[in-house]
Amino acid sequence: MKDLKWKRILAGAMAILLLAGCGKTNEGGDADTDSPGGQKVQGESSENGEPQGGGEDNRQADRSYVEGTSIDVTGMPQAELAEKKVTVYCWGEYVPEKLYDWQGYRFQDYYGGEVEVILSTGDYYENLYKLIAAGEIPDIVIGEAKSFPAFLMKDLVQPWDDYVDFDNPVWQETGSLEDIDKMRYDGKVYNITAKSHNLGVMFYNQRLISEAGLEEPMELQKRGEWTWEKFREYLDATTMDTTGDGITDVYGIVNTGDFPLALFASTGELHIEYENNQFINNMKSQKIQDAANFLYEIGNNGSQLMSLGDPVSEFLNGKAAFVYTNDYRGYVDYAALWETDGIGIVPMPKYSGADGQYQASLTDNIWLMKGAKNPEGAALLVLAEQYDSLLNVDPQAESARQSQIDDWMEKGFSREAAEAVLDINDMPTKILWPRNIPIADGNVEYRAMDTPWTTLSDTVSGSVDKAILDATTSE
């Protein structure tokens, strides 16, 4: 399999190096140069080709590092911080923990910046609004999906375009620009998102699949045969009454709150879409109807192939063959199952009417607030985080992909499952636009489990129109 991500890293670093013109070795001297934040940068190599300074075990020739560390800063542009401190409002710790000496948070480590985290107390948004009213405006606010368009309608934010150069190739190299462009408003970038990350993955119990006489879904996925139709067959085959008492005690799948969303998203459409500054009611789409019908047919009013029990205990105890949930559940909740029944991982299956195998995705919403005291520092912070995602790669691994595989395997995943997680992350994604628009009648996807779509679409369509209007009306 081609290591596309590693190629993107190398290509991006080289392109940015050419544009920035930094990290060059001084002729006739050592390779140290001053970084913008006053940190020494040890350059690419000495005359004998060996990196200089500390941390040689994790340093490579032809790369640049923060002095005395293995933190790679190759290709990063120079910049001066007039004001070092950037305030970030969020619900938890913001700066990531460093687990390895080659990991860096380059806004601090390279540019010499400081991050002051303002933690929410009580209701997240009400507390934010109180801070703003008191004049204590953060530079950056991390928002959930509903902050777009809510913050725009409240006129709380300013575009990043005046401070961030989105023509810098790093935004393309990380994959972030594609989703940033999807969320533009009036042609401007108001909220920055990292490359959208998958809502979850589909875990399956290998023992139950084998006992049902079925081929491994991972093998079907490799051949491009993991489809809705095949998924339905597997749900039928793994829903069983194992004791003969007439009561189903093993289900094809145990439901999670994310599974209905992921099923709808796999069509490539959702019942609310966003395009060209507009949220759109898409309830009448045939794709949405197909997803709703599939969900209804496997539910309690259909073939009863889906359990509504606790997804952790039921999957862990072999009471469900499939569960769709966050990938980290594989080592937090299901760790014991790897050594007993065995676990496989596949993406959501392909819907025949879609032009790709879409996976539901979440986006981070990073807002630059009106009245921010240090917008220039905030801009440098989000830029440095893009380089973090490119350059925080284990230098001892043969590739960036192998580094990530090793990380998953250290958590107990099989090699095949680890590879599947990475493959899923490279698949086409569908942003969950309905999460941006709260609907008073509740989530349409969840209601589709119990109500036929012909009934639901007629009764809910008006509520969707009202929700869109309410959410996109300026305050």
Image: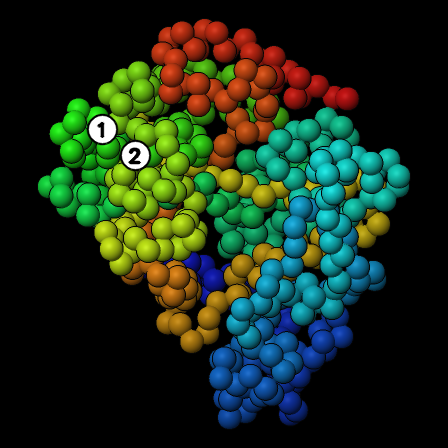
Name the residue at 65% across, 29% down.
Answer: 149
In the image, residue 129 sits, relative to residue 60, either above or below, namely above
In the image, residue 262 sits, relative to residue 475, either above or below, namely below
Q: CA distance from mark 1 to mark 2?
A: 12 Å
Q: x, y percentage for residue 307?
A: 32, 30
Name the secondary structure under disc 1: loop
- Hey, which quadrant is residue 45 in on the image? bottom right
Q: x, y percentage for residue 241?
A: 17, 30
Q: In this image, 219 relative to 157: left or right? A: left
Label drawn at residue 248? 1
Mark 2 highlights which residue? 253
- Hey, which quadrant is residue 269 in on the image? top left
Q: What's the residue type where badge 1 is placed?
A: Thr
Q: What's the residue type where badge 2 is placed?
A: Ile
Q: In this image, 339 relative to 16: left or right? A: left
Q: In this image, 74 relative to 347: left or right? A: right
Name the secondary structure under disc 2: strand
User: Residue farthest to the left?
Assistant: 213
Name the residue at 45% across, 6% down.
Answer: 458
